């Protein structure tokens, strides 16, 4: 399919490829695109896992088994795409899967392969707070990942979500489980970290619009956050009220959390990771000078609404 310049002839190509298309946000991006009548290629190492929320949902046009760490497989996976979304995550380093390899080297390789085959739009899902100069190796890798993607694919769009909420999230669901289980609630530090949680479906809609070139501002970085900022302590209290339980929030120093995370993050379903502790040390709110959901015409769903949905589903 590649022409003499090594670029694909994309005439008629209409596929949007979502790396990480079976993940928490990735599978919703896939579904949003399918709902818009777009052909979607969902790529991951276990493509048949978890692709859809409901059995009645449409299947992706293509489900591809590829590892972002294997250059030959990513070249094949992006071929013929009009847009590529990188929604691959790595929350815990294991063996050869390091933050540097996945969030920096593989992101750069995916962006380069996409540019080389003539993809029009490349979207890198990153996170609010990403910083190439951070002392946290996770946050630093996310920041460096953005830089290498922009260098490899001029015009790439970076989407930085705040912590995402939704029916199967790892954030509000965990708070809910703990407030229902424990009479006291261990806070990260004093619980004063400021957060602006965003509904995962709103982020998925934003990414699907950007993937289709609907970028009215032409901006290259979007910070997607919810309508309100809360302290972590406030969020715990909101969840407790909605779940009709009483809880007493108790401060726990970050140093203690770090020790706990270091001890448990290698368990198969890690309850806590050191990068989560790092992320909870600093405020995670959208920059006022960067575009976000509003600029993409999306009215963000409130945390209260999502917590109500979770309480109803429990
Ligand atoms: N969740 C949040 O609250 C949040 C907040 C801000 C930013 N983000 C960012 O959003 C992105 C997606 O996060 P998520 O929470 O949706 O992640 P997730 O649920 O863990 O999903 C990750 C996806 O990536 C795939 N994947 C992992 N390693 C891969 C590899 N080596 N090759 C190919 N595919 C691979 C997974 O499938 P397989 O394992 O089957 O390959 C899965 O489809 C990440 O960049 C994350 O940092 C998330």
Image (cartoon, rainbow, N blue to C red):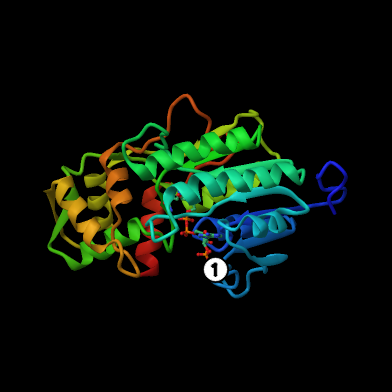
What is the total number of numbered labels drawn onto the structure image? 1
Q: Is residue 292 left or right of residue 275?
A: right
From the image, which quarter does the N terminus lie in?
bottom right
Q: Is residue 85 left or right of residue 1?
A: left
For the point 13% across and 49% down, the residue is 252
**Residue 306 locus on image (x, y percent):** 41, 55
**Residue 23 locus on image (x, y percent):** 51, 61
In this view, which residue lies farthest toward the top?
A: 289
For the point 19% across and 58% down, the residue is 260
Mark 1 burial class by Cα count in 10 Å: few <14, some 14-19, many 20+:
few
Secondary structure category for the residue under label 1 = loop
Ligand 1 within 8 A of label 1's CB?
A: no
Residue 166 visible in this rendered orientation of the protein:
yes
Residue 35 visible in this rendered orientation of the protein:
no
Q: Is residue 48 above or below residue 296?
A: below
Residue linked to disc 1: 53
**Residue 149 locus on image (x, y percent):** 58, 38
Q: Is residue 189 left or right of residue 92?
A: left
**Residue 283 locus on image (x, y percent):** 31, 36
Question: Can you tell which quarter of the image residue 311 is in?
Answer: bottom left
Q: Is residue 186 above or below residue 271?
A: above
From the image, which quarter does the C terminus lie in?
bottom left
For the point 59% across and 54% down, the residue is 29
For the point 59% across and 31% down, the residue is 220
Q: Nearer the viewer, residue 305 or 230?
A: 230
């Amino acid at each position: 399919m590649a022409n003499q310049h090594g670029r694909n002839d994309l005439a008629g190509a209409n596929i949007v490829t979502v790396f990480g298309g079976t993940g928490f946000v990735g599978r919703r991006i896939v579904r949003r695109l399918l709902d818009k009548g777009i052909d979607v290629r969902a790529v991951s190492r276990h493509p048949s896992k978890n692709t859809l929320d409901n059995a009645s949902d449409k299947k992706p046009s293509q489900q591809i088994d590829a590892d972002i760490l294997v250059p030959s497989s990513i070249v094949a996976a992006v071929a013929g795409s009009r847009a590529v979304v990188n929604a691959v995550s790595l929350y815990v380093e294991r063996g050869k899967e390091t933050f540097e390899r996945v969030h920096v080297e593989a992101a750069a390789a995916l962006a380069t392969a996409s540019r080389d085959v003539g993809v029009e739009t490349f979207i890198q899902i990153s996170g609010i707070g990403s910083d190439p100069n951070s002392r946290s190796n996770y946050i630093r890798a996310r920041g460096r990942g953005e830089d290498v993607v922009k260098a490899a694919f001029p015009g790439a769009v970076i989407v930085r979500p705040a912590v995402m909420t939704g029916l199967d999230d790892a954030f509000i669901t965990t708070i809910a489980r703990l407030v229902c289980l424990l009479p006291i609630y261990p806070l990260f530090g004093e619980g004063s970290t400021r957060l602006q949680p965003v509904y995962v479906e709103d982020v998925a809609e934003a990414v699907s619009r950007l993937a289709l070139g609907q970028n009215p501002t032409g901006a290259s970085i979007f910070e997607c956050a919810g309508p309100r900022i809360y302290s972590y302590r406030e969020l715990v209290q909101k969840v407790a009220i909605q779940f009709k339980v009483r809880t007493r929030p108790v401060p726990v120093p970050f140093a203690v959390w770090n020790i706990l995370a270091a001890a448990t993050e290698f368990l198969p379903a890690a309850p806590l990771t050191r990068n989560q502790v790092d992320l909870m040390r600093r405020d995670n709110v959208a920059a006022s000078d960067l575009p976000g959901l509003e600029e993409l015409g999306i009215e963000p769903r409130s945390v209260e609404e999502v917590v109500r949905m979770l309480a109803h589903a429990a």
